[in-house]
Amino acid sequence: MKNIVITISRQYGSGGKTIGAMLAKDLGINCYSREILRMASEDSGINERLFGMTDEKVRHASWFRILSRPYDGELLPPEDKGFTSDDNLFNYQAKVIKELAAKESCVIVGRCADYVLQDYPHVMSVFIHADKKFCLERAMERHSMTEREMQKYIEKTDAYRGDFYRYHTGHEWADARNYDLCLNSGKLGFEKCVEEIKAYKKIRFGE
């Protein structure tokens, strides 16, 4: 049977990463998120700290966010002046994502994996979202900020993710048309989100 990869994009505080981990455990497969940064660092020889600085965010000035340079797969060599550019750092992450998809069934959280693997037939893409109140309450459980500070942090993080997705794909991050399945974790809860994803997987790919 072909490897099946489930990609998960998520709003901050919606629990998308947790849902991805729960899903992977239930299916008996690996879940990859920030591990991709380490793997890309090892593959390229570029310091992992630089990958962290561009982790689902664009380092350019705000005016640059309206532009986009969709992923084309080109990897620049160490002697090139753009070796540590946002584009090349992303391309190394994309290389890792493609290698994982070729090697195993897995869950991949964030990092435009849905776009990187768009031509792979055995990939299903999921977007996890929730209302502001749910995201705020859940985020407050994990961070010692005031509600006002936390709400600003959530908005900033989602804006970063949106900019990152737009820049590297040319599409809008929160547009439902980019995904196979969009789920409201605030209404369904994490366990039911996992069940919905598994149900879609069964309908789409069979057992």
Image: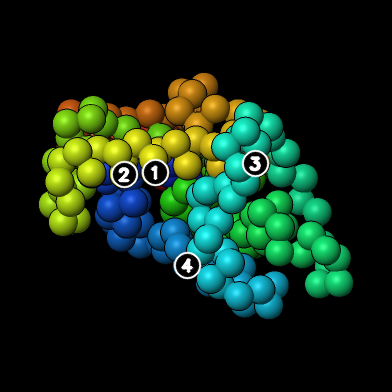
Residue in view at x 60 percent, y 75 percent = 47
Gap between marks 2 and 1, in whole Å?
A: 6 Å
Of pointers 3 and 1, the one earlier in the residue sequence:
1
Nearer to me, 65 or 128 = 65
Measured along the vertical axis of the image, is residue 39 above or below residue 200? below
Nearer to me, 117 or 138 = 138
- Left or right relative to 69: residue 169: left
Which amino acid type corresponds to the residue marked 2 in the rendered image? Tyr
Residue 201 showing in the rendered view: no
Which amino acid type corresponds to the residue marked 4 in the rendered image? Glu
Q: Secondary structure at mark 4?
A: helix
Give the mark toward the camera: 3 or 4.
3
Asked if marks 2 and 1 touch (Cβ < 8 Å), the reply is yes
Q: Secondary structure at mark 3?
A: helix
Disc 3 marks which residue? Answer: 168
Q: Secondary structure at mark 1?
A: helix
Disc 4 marks which residue? Answer: 35
Of pointers 3 and 2, the one earlier in the residue sequence:
2
Mark seen at residue 119: none
Q: Quadrant of residue 116?
A: top right
Q: Position of residue 204 (x, y in %)?
A: 47, 33
Mark seen at residue 157: 1
Of pointers 1 and 4, the one earlier in the residue sequence:
4
Gap between marks 3 and 2, in whole Å?
A: 22 Å
Gap between marks 4 and 2, in whole Å?
A: 23 Å
Q: Position of residue 72 (x, y in %)?
A: 77, 45
- Left or right relative to 159: residue 163: right
Disc 2 marks which residue? Answer: 153
Q: How is the image coloured?
A: rainbow
Residue 84 showing in the rendered view: yes
Q: Secondary structure at mark 2?
A: helix
Gap between marks 3 and 1, in whole Å?
A: 17 Å
